[in-house]
Image (cartoon, grey):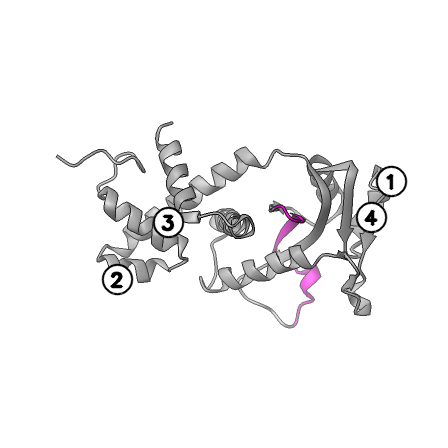
Amino acid sequence: MTAKSPYRKRSKLGVGQIRKIVRYFCEDMTASMTSRLLNIERKTINDRYMYIREIIYEYSIETDKEIWKWTIEIDESYFWAKRIKWKRWRWAWWKTKVLGLLKRKGKVYVQVVPDCSVKSLIPIIKGKIDPNDSEVNTDWWKAYDGLIHLWYERHYRVHHSKDEFARWKKHINGIESFRSYTKRRLAKFNGVPKHTFILHLKECEFRFNCRLAKENMYKKVLKLMRSFTKR
């Protein structure tokens, strides 16, 4: 009789196989490579990879309720599988819009938004950042104009269109680094389905935060899997 897996209910894979899949996932190996190394069907590997992403997503929902203080960088991003040269990127309505926040010496938080208007961005910023004990850094996107009226008195901006990227410690280089990292990771999939984009996005957030905190991602994912399996 096969022992009950502590990492997933009703799993036909052994504990050793699941741990190897998790290790290869944490090493950012593709499902195809993992399938060849373990001699397991690619469909099975894809299923396990997506299950891990779902757990990471649920974990992020549970832990993203903290109100941030300190120095925060804010930036909006636009994601799409392919670049269309004849359209101005900011006005491409079919792209997925993402708001990113990064707490310096802390972690990153991302959320998909319907658009990059004041109505969509400001409620997220208000719900995530303490206006009294925070310093906010943004670019000159018009949606951030009203932050000063919301008690975010220490609001600093960099003007990218004028080739200004930093003034001493006033910059958004950290959150832009996350954006570049995420776009490079997603590019290797040759397009991510829209209904699973949020799972891949939160996976990138999780990986980036583990790297910032110098955490062992493999041990953390195993712990999360054991915790969610017991529910």
Foreground mark, 4 or 3? 4
Structural distance between the alpha carbons of marks 2 and 4: 51 Å
Q: Secondary structure at mark 4?
A: strand
Which residue is most to the top? 231
- Is 28 on the left or on the right of 19, as rendered? right
> Does 73 lie within the magenta span?
no
Amino acid type shown at disc 2: Arg
**Residue found 87% across the figure and 40% down from its top:** 149
Q: How many other residues sit within 10 Å of disc 3, few (<14), some (14-19) or many (≥20)?
A: some
Q: Nearer the viewer, residue 215 or 125?
A: 215
- Is 99 on the left or on the right of 52, as rendered? right
**Residue found 37% across the figure and 49% down from its top:** 49
Which residue in the structure is indicated by mark 4? 155
Structural distance between the alpha carbons of marks 2 and 1: 57 Å
Structural distance between the alpha carbons of marks 3 and 2: 15 Å
Span highlighted in magenta in the image: 86-106
Name the image quarter holding residue 14: top left
Foreground mark, 2 or 4? 4
Q: Nearer the viewer, residue 93 or 7?
A: 7
Foreground mark, 1 or 4? 4
Q: Secondary structure at mark 2?
A: helix
Structural distance between the alpha carbons of marks 1 and 4: 10 Å
Is tag 4's residue or tag 3's residue first in the polypeptide sequence? 3
Which residue in the structure is indicated by mark 1? 149
Residue 90 appears at what percent x and percent y? 70, 61
- Is 185 on the left or on the right of 103, as rendered? left
Amino acid type shown at disc 1: His
Question: Residue 36 bears which disc, if any?
Answer: 2
